Amino acid sequence: MKISGTIRKWTLGMAAVVWLAGAVPMVWNGGLKQAAAAGKQDGAKGRAASVAEEEMEVHFIDVGQADSILVKTSSAAMLIDAGNNEDGDLVVSYLKEQGVKKLDYVVGTHPHEDHIGGMDDVINSFEVETVILPSKTHTSKTFLDVLTAIKKNQLQITPACAGDEYSLGKDEFTILSPKKKEDYKDELNNWSVCLRLEHGSTSFVFTGDAESAVEKEMLDSGLELDGTVYKAAHHGSETSNTEEFLDAVNPEYVVISCGVDNQYGHPDLSVLEELADRDIEVFRTDEQGTVVAASDGKMVQWSTKPSTSMKEGKNPKAVETTVYITSSGEKYHSQGCRYLKKSSIPITLEEAQVGEYTPCSVCHPPN
Ligand SMILES: [Zn+2]
Ligand SMILES: [Zn+2]
């Protein structure tokens, strides 16, 4: 559904053309194949240039516990997030290897470091047409570095606004969130720029770290949400990826961008189970490294086979930390809390979290 009146459409003319190294799609003339060098060459040989023009590739770059996604077609490129501060060089060299000379769009979903950390390096290394950010400032050095890079390169920030549509080469994407004039306060995750990208009859949905409240808002927005591919929100956390939202997106494939043994315990087992119940094929950067999807406008093929591990993220801190519960309460506590006078049962933080105990608001135990 289109929201008239507020639609700003950037039609990029010839100036937006990027040069892509040979514009050779990664492989796959039918069936899943590992992205082994030999396979790549075989696949490229069998492919006519005109077919490449119809392709859209979406690269979920392995940046550990962070997000960075490159979208490229034969005539345009977009980067959604740029990993942590230390990933800047990695993202820049990945884009160079991919033949990217110019980015039509750089989207910083929200001011957390694991999303905009490497963005200053990207903006300083490539010609960038449009920078899309949420209308939320932040005082962190990471965020200020991004603002400095934007200014230095004489760019302006285009604020993301739900319902706005943009052209990416011959394709289009629509901003799903944040809502115009909505104040998500200091819930930075909920400021996430969410977008739906269409390529032929296939589509991709990216929602940054947006949590369940924003998923509900998107459901109520009337905007089209279905996506062949969905990048799991918030690294596969159970604070997002609600059943109702998954019903609406109804993806065939889900990609989870997360780090090995990350301290947040992403992805959550409950999310993995929900995806498995729905027979959704799951790809994970912690297990599979960079994962590439290629759409010909009708179907999506992958650089690797889906993950079958069902391995939830492990939070080493939660395994090592001891907290205390009582025989009847639903909260967990730090040692010495006044609520532990009658009963004090030590358990690990992980057990407390799995058992759905919530942190006590008096003693503020770790979470
Ligand atoms: Zn975040
Ligand atoms: Zn994040």
Image: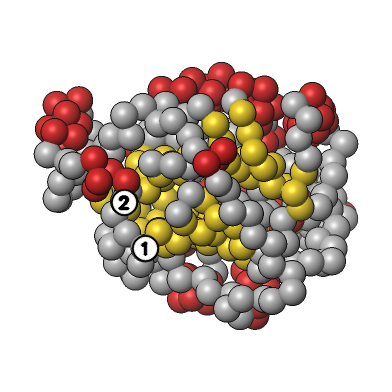
Q: Is mark 2 within 8 Å of ligand 2?
A: no
Q: Is residue 136 above or below residue 240?
A: above
Question: What element does badge 2 sit on?
Answer: loop
User: Which image quarter holds the N terminus?
Assistant: bottom right
List x then y, in percent, for residue 270: 46, 62
Q: Residues within 10 Å of mark 2 (few under 14, many from 20)?
A: some
Residue underneath mark 2: 54
Q: Quadrant of residue 303?
A: top left
List x then y, in percent, for residue 259: 49, 36
Q: Residue furthest front?
A: 14
Separation of disc 1 and disc 2 at Cα? Answer: 9 Å
The residue located at (27%, 60%) in the rendering is 299
The residue located at (32%, 59%) in the rendering is 297
Residue underneath mark 1: 200
Mark before the other along the chain sequence, 1 or 2: 2
Q: Which amino acid lies under the numbered mark 1 shown in the image of this protein?
A: Gly
The residue located at (61%, 80%) in the rendering is 222
Q: Are the residues at dot 1 and dot 2 in contact (C-beta closer than 8 Å)?
A: yes
List x then y, in percent, for residue 51: 24, 47
List x then y, in percent, for residue 365: 77, 47
Q: Does the residue labelled 1 lie within 8 Å of ligand 2?
A: no
Does residue 75 appear left or right of residue 177 in this picture? Answer: left
The residue located at (56%, 19%) in the rendering is 89
Residue 111 in view: yes
Q: Quadrant of residue 67?
A: top right
Q: In this view, does 23 lie above or below 105?
A: above
Residue in front for this viewpoint, 311 or 89: 89
